[in-house]
Amino acid sequence: MSEPNLSAFIWSVADLLRGDYKQSEYGKVILPFTVLRRLDCVLEATKPAVLAEKLLREKAGLNPEPFLLKKSGQHFFNTSPLDLKKLMGDPDNIGENLRDYVVGFSPAVRDIFERFEFHTQIDRLAKAGLLYLVTEKFAHIDLHPKLVSNAQMGLVFEELIRKFAELSNETAGEHFTPREVIRLMVNLLFFEDDDALTKPGVVRSIYDPTAGTGGMLSVAGEHLAGVNPGARLVMYGQELNPESYAICKADMLIKGQDIANIKFGNTLSADGLVGKHFDYMLSNPPFGVEWKKIEKEVRKEAEQLGYDGRFGPGLPRVSDGSLLFLLHLVSKMRPAKDGGSRFGIVLNGSPLFTGGAGSGESEIRRYMLENDLVEAIIALPTDMFYNTGISTYVWIVSNRKPAQRKGKVQLIDAGGFFQKMRKSLGSKRKELSPDHIDDITRIFGDFKKVTRKGVPISRIFKNEDFGYRTITVERPERDDKGNRVLGTKGKCKGKPVADANLRDTENVPLSEDVEAYFQREVLPHAPDAWIDHEKTKVGYEIPFNRHFYVFKPPRPLAEIDKDLKGVTDRILSMIGGLSQ
């Protein structure tokens, strides 16, 4: 069955729920039942062997679990003699039997249904007289892996999640990143390692600290399988939303991954994979979300552990935690001597420039650039995500840059690379076509300056090009006669007293000599000024738009005057018409 048909079928269950459930609650029933039916189909062939093995091992007084995993051929099993088809034979006891069936799964799978709060839904459906009807619907849909591949199943999950998120007026983007954006990120992530990844039997690890329903991990797995079917990608993730976590875990389970690698909870306040490092990482953290709820834990780690923890370089303002995720990923990089790491993260515009010299944001940028970790930043078109129309940027970060990239950052403006969607989805009105993805990947790979039709697309900068010194320019306080006031005490004795009202600051690029800048830009306008060197701070910002700005000269004045005269004449004739 194709994905649209499958989604439509599963969606038709909503017709049964209408009236007894609000639209925003449909997902609470449909998602766990979809997972249950998929697992039901996956285990069908090995079910008799698993049950026989259980009896055999229990008689021998052995823990049957490792033997059952072997017999099922999966990372999970079910020891109940029931399945969804058998449940149909006893309508009167459907609730009790369904519970027993779910309890028969191995512990990691039971956790999935607990996060879905499935038992609550069984009770609610039973009270509404819908439990048998809904179970019957799912029992009759064939979700065997031979008919529906893991990739198709993943797409179905994501499609359903997005629909339910939109219905409940949540931000769909919290759970769902557009597939084409993930494909682009995966392309950029693996680009420089294509040779290594084509070797037989290669094993690599990938991690997503904001895993959602597992979309990024899935696309990365599909990409690597396409390049090298013999390669293996071991997937790790953490997710805060219980429903998304349940789906991600179910998806990984079906793909043959070890679901002990998928953790539940807040990555920033309770890292579920402490001390682990990964070859590759991908993340689309929530944009501009404040971190007040976890401020205590984050500040404690920053203060007590410093650079031995995750937040040594600095902390951003509490209103936006994006850069905390960036630092978290940096902490998960393998040391360069052990092969290093690369990661891609989607951020909004504020991490590029928010905060002046000395602020948490600037210090984090300083750390990233002075340690030569930023390979490239790609500006995506607006209206690419389901929950926001704002500008977004993909950062590609690595501690194993190829020789030609060392000490440099590539900025790519892909804001014009899109096609309009036939039907918008939430805030998403644009998408990247496969050709756009290939084009951006090529521009990234070529690592050259690119201009098309007079418009810059790719530019290469040195890391220090983004650095500056903020100098404090002082001017003397003067008395009523206009004479400079001199200090009378300590080290200030005999020196001009600074007038706080005349104090100013100037940003001097790191590449410029401060004294030369001061003499050229300040002294001609304020000959009595001086620099207070004790107040000088180093800052970093990446003014992306400024580097891609193309000046368009205004129209000639005569042309503007002509237009204005035309408008004025029209207004006068309209006024004339009113006064008649």
Image (cartoon, rainbow, N blue to C red):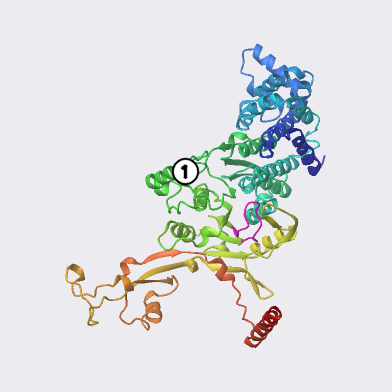
Of residues 239 and 32, the one drawn nearer to the viewer in this rendering: 32
Whether residue 202 is visible, yes or no, is: no
At a point 55% along the width and 70% down the height, the residue shown is 546
Please provide percent x and percent y for residue 533.
32, 69
Q: Which residue is under mark 1?
A: 293
Report the predominant secondary structure element of the magenta stretch: loop
466 to the left or right of 538 = right
Any part of residue 302 in sight:
yes
Instruction: Using the image as rendered, state which of residue 203 and residue 464 is in the foreground.
Output: 464
Q: Secondary structure at mark 1?
A: helix
Tell me the quarter of the image containing the C terminus.
bottom right
Question: Which residue occupies the foreground of this view, 205 or 326?
Answer: 326
- Give the total number of marks visible in the rendering: 1
Crowd around label 1: few <14 · some 14–19 · many ≥20 (10 Å): few
Give the x, y percent position of residue 371: 47, 58
Query: Which residues fall within the magenta stretch?
Result: 379-393
Q: Would you say 128 lies left or right of 502 here?
A: right
Say which amino acid is labelled 1: Lys
